[in-house]
Amino acid sequence: MSPAPPDRTSLRDRPEHSSSSPLSIHAMTVAYDRKPVLWDVDYDAPTGRLVAIVGPNGAGKSTLIKGCLGLVPLASGVVEYRGRPLEEVRQRIGYVPQRESVDWEFPVSALDVTLMGRYGRIGWCRPIGRRHRAAARECLERVGLAGLENRQIDQLSGGQQQRVFLARALAQEADLYFMDEPFAGVDAATERAIVEVLRDMRDAGRTVIVVHHDLQTVPEYFDEVLLLNMRVVAAGPVEDAFTRENLQKTYGGRLTLLAEAAEAIARGRRGRDRG
Amino acid sequence: MNSLDPALDLFPLAASILAAITCGVLGNFLLLRRESLMGDAISHGVLPGLVIGFLITGDRSPFTMLIGATVAGIATVLLVMLVRRLGRVEAGAAMGVVFSVLFALGVLLIERAARQTDIDADCVLHGQLETLAWYDAPALWRDVPAWTTIESIPRQVWGLVIACLLACGFVIAFFKELRLAAFDPGLASSLGLRPRAIDLVTMVLVAIATVASFEAVGSILVIAMLICPAATARLLTDRLSRQVLLSVVVAIATAVLGYRAATVVPSWFDDESVNAAGSMAMTAGIILVAAILLAPVHGVVSRSIRSRRLARRIAVDDLLATLLRTEEARSPDAVPASAVNLLRPPKPAAIERARRSGLVEGRSGSDLRLTEDGRRVARDVLRRHRLWETYLVEEAGLSPDHVHDPAEVLEHLGPIPSIRSSRDPHGRPIPDPD
């Protein structure tokens, strides 16, 4: 059984998705090594809100982000940003990967990393102008790192490194942001600083979608939640969707059943391929 | 022979320097992506490509060679990715398997074609710098610019000039993209800056550098130059732009020193000169070892000096704190001392150092007293120690009889806990800051 051909048609004719939504995901399925990680995800993000993606380990939270950004191939599904495909709007979409995903011994300064957020805007082969440097410095100030701009990134604490990533996202001046666990392993002061910056972004009309692992702080930090465990369990304003029942569905018994089903299918496919 | 002769040395030296720069510049990005071995893989993998190119067309023109080798270089990269994915082995193992197999294939093909060709595996490995001798050269170096014509420059040198321009031009034009692709391919790709394409072009350039170099300097030098100058420069700076510039300087120095060493060093032992490419690769290794030992911040020596200095400071600090604690224990309102039993006897070297710095006076033993300066330092150490003890009990929830040892370490380090208290968990006073 080969995977269904990717459904590349536009979502314009699908009334359940709105072309005014900063992010519309339709029927996204992603598989690693034939083992499905995300199944048939449908989601429309609201404008100007902070959205938490919540779910257990292996629920496909990072994969959802990577699928939206075209960093992993989709087995099927369509992603649109205000009714347009990713290729047309790349510069308007920001990405903050997990802190461990990069080599912090890399020979660059905090300012160098922040400036990377502006590379798309600067364009291929063009030198980095003074205007961009000034903008990047301002972003470092906004996250409370003024004076550390020439520090090699290895000489920063974990919390400061995370703030550099945030400054880089700010420097990109995108409309929609994906952040993968920006609160992982940071100190209390950094956590407060990050929340403050996120709220500023929201108040400026940006949409920020954050993979978050601390259930306790979801109602305090976020407006919307997307409960994910291979498929969307619930999504919507925190008051409506972040309920005990939905959490149970996300983290509880159903998870193991679904995971087993996926496992069985993957095994079946492998067996068939050999035979 | 102790001076350079235009006829024998001009073009070999120029070829060596050009090859060193080309590989040195590209090596920076292989190093940062932890793919240095890929250069090794490509430079071995191109061998069958060279031979097949020759066997198909029957001529040894650089263009045929370049096509064959570039195809083989790209095939090496793709094969490594394939073996890695299908064989589920780590990158190093995949590269090792692919390049040794391809190189072996190249050697077999050469043997098979031996009668028709003058390529052999040896010349691929260490090159034939001697073929670059310029028999019509002027006797004096100052006549060289006037005598040099386009025709007098050997084909191999032209190839290296082109490869060098390509590599340097690529790195300068795409510096920003190369930096991002190596640091954070995820962001690069989300911005549409195609990290995979950049990676592929880098690999193709490595293949071109290998082909351009192999005839003159051989692949041993290519491998050494892809790794050593970049690794040396990485130890000397923490900024990528400076690292790339330094790697070029190191590459040039390596080529010149290595080339000279090939004739000069054996002459000390009344021996004949050795293969220059081999000598340059050795020099690259020696310079890297020197950088590992002597680099200002990341070097072994400076790190050990720093840690020895810290150890000395700690020994003196501990001595001063012990003296202050002893004074405290003698005073009438002293808290009964159990902790004094925990104090280690001071090292004689620490006493000597403290006396020289004017921190203590008197002879050793019970006669040793703190000076005013010494008392100030001791009060600071004791203050840090007791603040840490208080912090560990109140904030970290340790029991009072478990906090001395960690506080003994923490008192010597940078941070001071922000805690307000006048007594430590054992009831002893915490000295005020000066």
Image: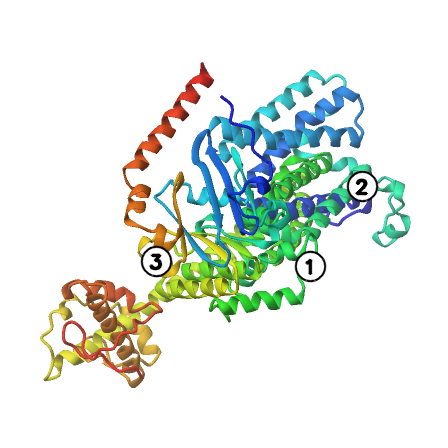
Q: Position of residue A148 (x, y in %)?
A: 50, 68
What residue is rendered at 19% in x and 75% in y? B365
In this rendering, does residue B297 appear at all?
no
Indicate how the structure is coloured in the image.
rainbow
Q: Quickly name the residue at label 2.
A: B158
Q: Amino acid at mark 3?
A: Pro
Residue B106 lies in quadrant: top right
Give the secondary structure at mark 3: helix
Gap between marks 1 and 3 measured at Cα: 43 Å
Q: Say whether residue B28 is left or right of residue B9.
A: left
Relative to B275, is A44 above or below?
below
Q: Are marks 3 and 2 on the same chain?
A: no
Residue farthest along the top direction in this orientation = A275
Report the residue marked by disc 1.
A127
Tag 3 residue: A219
Measuring from the top left, give residue A228's x and y in whole percent: 39, 43
Answer whether residue B245 is visible to the viewer in this image: yes
Image vertical order of residue B16 relative to residue B71, above or below: below
